[in-house]
Amino acid sequence: MEQAKMCKHNMKLYPTYYSLSYDYLFFYTINVLFLIQIKHVSIATIVLVDSFYALFSFIFQIPANIIIDKLGRKKSAILGNVLNSVYLLIYIFGQNVLHLIIAEMITAFGFALKDVVSPSILNNSIPQTTKKSKIFSKINSKGLARYYILNSISLIISGYLYNVNGYMPLILSLAVVLISLLLSICFIEPVQNNDEKEETTFKQQLSDTKDGFKYIFKSGRLKSLILYGAIMAGVISLLANLQTSMTEDLNISSTIIGLIFAFFEIVSGLSAKMQEKFHNTFKNKSLTILGISIGLFCITSTIGMFFNLPLIVTLIILTISFTVTNIVRGLYFVLINRYLSNFTNEQIDSKIFTAYLLACGIIKAILGVITSFVLELITPYETMLIVGISSLILFALIAIYMKSRLGLKVQEYKVDEIKYANLESII
């Protein structure tokens, strides 16, 4: 009965917690304006600082898993929210780039904890059933969709408040993180299956991660998914800053910018809820369509500026292009977790997700450093064109690589490759 009570409590609480803690509300888009206009930081430096976040995410992945093992899921979620609160305080009061880099180190550690424990709390709170993966996907996408809706509302409000006082959106963001902290305290720690849990050491965690990579390199399907996922995560990370900078260059007010990016969040939220229909429609072509689309519409977003079109036309082109890229963003984050989890079980899942997050971290860091250097030489519009062309080529090549590795019939996979798979949901 106690186990059933825990499951029901956590499953009910999770969508609300996830929607508030998935990422910073009242923050994104405005944070770029805040750094450029109030802290007088260049867009190239902002992208470089973001690359430090990716690098720290890579470095902290294994230590975070060890801390989660020692503290448990609930306490790790609490610690993650505490660290994110500290991040925002440094962001508000910081005086130089070094302070921003320290802040990125702190929030990277916070999210390294939260990115692992959040889905783990949900996964371990769902009773064992043949429909467990569908229940997980439904609750997870519900929380993510709520986040996108809340973020869209927060962007509208923060765009207006930024005109009143540039610090007000950041203070509201801090308030939401503190609410997330209180909600994380309300979780009930999921019961472990084993009575005596063996303590994980750094050496053990490193060995587990190596095992995950070994299995990935044996699996053509997992190599395809992680190669694709890491590059897509890197491109989406770059777009967050480039899109804001391109819009800000049009010299429109922060209120209008807030409204535009609020619309994009609604689009991402709705597309996240449509992941099941999208997957059922396109099957093993789903990832290819997403990759080609994001590259193509990165390119189209630059048309208005390069052809010196009227402001309203340029704004319409930007809005349409960025709408498509945000549809891709909403679908991608749900689908990549679904596809990775469909090919694993409790014996291998943490190793695979750790390897995936490590790959994402290193690719984000590399792309961030390269893009920061490019932005020192050319404009954000020209940089976006390069990102678009490069993405289109990369995803076309990856699509060719994935063609013979994804979407095969069960009997076409090697036995070793599918030994951890849920055969009913292989893509």
Image (cartoon, rainbow, N blue to C red):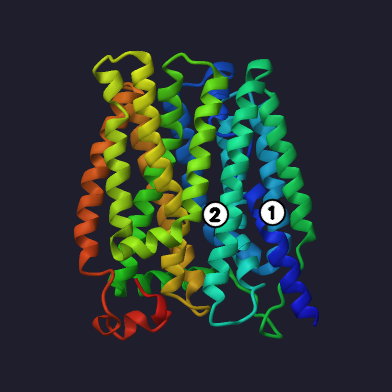
Identify the residue under disc 2.
60
Q: Image point 47% across, 76% down: which residue?
A: 348
Residue 208 placement (x, y as % from top left):
48, 73
Front residue (pair 99, 416) = 416
Residue 316 placement (x, y as % from top left):
37, 25
Identify the residue under disc 1.
16
Image quadrant assignment for residue 153 = top right
Q: What's the residue type where badge 2 is placed?
A: Phe
Q: Image point 49% across, 53% down: which residue?
A: 272
**One can see residue 83 in this view:** yes
Q: What's the residue type where badge 1 is placed?
A: Thr
- Crowdedness near tag 2: few (<14), some (14–19) or many (≥20) residues, C-alpha within 10 Å: many
Residue 34 placement (x, y as % from top left):
58, 23
User: Which label number is shown at residue 246?
Assistant: none
Residue 291 placement (x, y as % from top left):
30, 50
Front residue (pair 77, 404) = 404
Q: Image point 34% across, 20% down: which residue?
A: 314
